[in-house]
Amino acid sequence: MHTWHWHNWQGLPYLTCSVLKDWHHGFFTQQFWPRSPEDLTTVLHPKALAYRLKQVHGNIVLTPEDIERRTGEDDSGLVLGDGVISQQPLQAVWVASADCTPILIGDVKTRQVAALHAGWRGTAAKILPVAITRLQEQGSKLDDLRIAMGPAIAGEVYQVSLDVAAQIGASIIPYAQPQQIIEALHELPHSPLLVDPEPGKVRLDVRRVNVLQLESLGMSAEQIAIAPYCTYQTPEYFFSYRRERQKKIQWSGIVSAIDPDIL
């Protein structure tokens, strides 16, 4: 299966995954705080251009062209959205996360990449299938995609309400009633739901739901990797909003490559 590797840049640690070995990429740790995506792009590839969004926990997925067209719409100077898909070589796409799941995608044929921010709301809104549809519109085929889900809060420590669990479960379960959705989730192999001792609560594995969304599209386990790290339980490397209640983040990014067939 896929392996995860620690790297060092000027004494600071970051992660890469073998499923994305064809691309310069990294899941950066809190030690890089408060460096910007522009700064971190130089770590991955000094000639790449950085693209990021003002994340809003939705399912908006944009290209650099979209971003350039919409710049200035928000007071922050950043365009709203939670996913970026490259269009050209040497475009670095970035997402920020604390407990939400950073997802990096590469296409072994087109060499294009994507970066997504998938918390429970974005996952409920199917940001990953939305991004894959957008990649397919740009020429990708499902079999050519490679997906890495970075450090995020793990299911065993992520307590949510039954309502939240039902909302996210509706992305993979065809029932309309919340109670039916909860029951069906519990019955799944490797269920994304774990029992919580508090009434009206469950523990939720958001990354597992994203995997189930991919499987429903027909993707195989060999195309997907999940980081063996929980942001909440690894305070030495990762910020966790649930743990600290501070708005500090770590960045994850990937650089689109040049198609080797046209070199």
Image (cartoon, grey):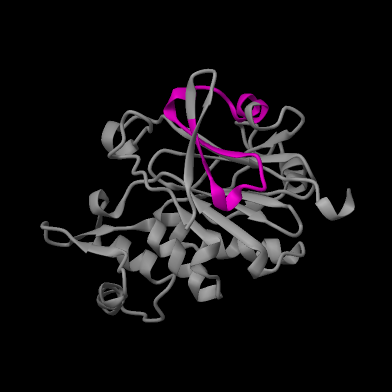
In magenta stretch: residue 247? no
Q: Which residue: 29% across, 78% down?
A: 184
In the picture provided, is 174 more to the left or to the right than 232?
right
* Highlighted range, magenta: 14-42
Q: Which residue: 36% across, 80% down?
A: 176
Q: Which residue: 67% across, 64% down?
A: 144
Q: Quadrant of residue 179?
A: bottom left
In the picture provided, is 16 more to the left or to the right than 136?
left
Residue 258 percent coordinates (x, y): 80, 46
Q: Which residue: 60% across, 58% down?
A: 146
Can I make out residue 53 in this image?
no
Residue 229 percent coordinates (x, y): 36, 44
Where 166 falls versus 52 (above or below)?
A: below
Residue closer to the observer: 167 or 36: 36
Report how many numbered discs are placed on residues in the image.
0
In magenta stretch: residue 39? yes
Residue 180 percent coordinates (x, y): 28, 80
Can I make out residue 23 in this image?
yes
